[in-house]
Amino acid sequence: MSIIKPHDITLYGGNDTCKVILRPLSDDDLPQLYKWNSDPEVLYWTEGDDVESYPAEVVHQIYGGISQNNPCFAVEVNGEMIGECWLQKMNLPDVKAMYEPDTDVRRIDMSIGEKAYWGKGIGRNSAAA
């Protein structure tokens, strides 16, 4: 049985020098997720300064839980997995109020785990995906 719920959505974006693909996140990506979720510097930017590391069981809980109701993606740049993201159902009342009640409004939660890609505008280029 899979930890991460599969889906079949792939999104494409980027520019001439930075090809960004958001492909379905899968259990095959768990080694990368373990790496990033055990790095205090990466976690500082995603969780705050009170989390040093997450063990594998917690990583399973996080991504297994999130993927049940939200499509989860691996962020690839020029063929290399550099991060992860998901399309979370909007939970901000002010934003939800701008749309009809039955509209599926989402926001993207993204983390770039590969530090060599920090500050390179990848999140901005992914918005075009």
Image (cartoon, grey):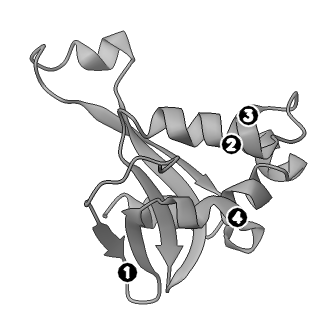
Instruction: Return the disc, 3 or 2, that comes first in the chain's sequence.
Output: 3
Q: Amino acid at mark 3?
A: Glu
Mark 4: give few (<14), some (14-19) or many (20+) Cα within 10 Å. Answer: few
Q: Position of residue 103 (x, y in %)?
A: 12, 25
Disc 3/disc 2 C-alpha distance (Å): 13 Å
Q: Position of residue 58 (x, y in %)?
A: 72, 36
Q: Give 117 or 29, whichever is nearer the viewer.
A: 29
Q: Which residue is mark 4?
A: 31
Q: Which residue is mark 2?
A: 59
SS for dot 2 = helix
Q: Position of residue 94 (x, y in %)?
A: 32, 13
Instruction: Return the disc, 3 or 4, that comes first in the chain's sequence.
Output: 4
Disc 3/disc 4 C-alpha distance (Å): 19 Å
**Residue 128 at least partly seen:** yes
SS for dot 1 = loop
Q: Give 93 or 26, whichever is nearer the viewer.
A: 26
Closer to viewer: mark 3 or mark 1: 3
Disc 2/disc 4 C-alpha distance (Å): 10 Å
Disc 2/disc 1 C-alpha distance (Å): 32 Å
Name the quadrant containing residue 13.
bottom left
Q: Which residue is mark 1?
A: 15
Q: Position of residue 120 (x, y in %)?
A: 61, 70
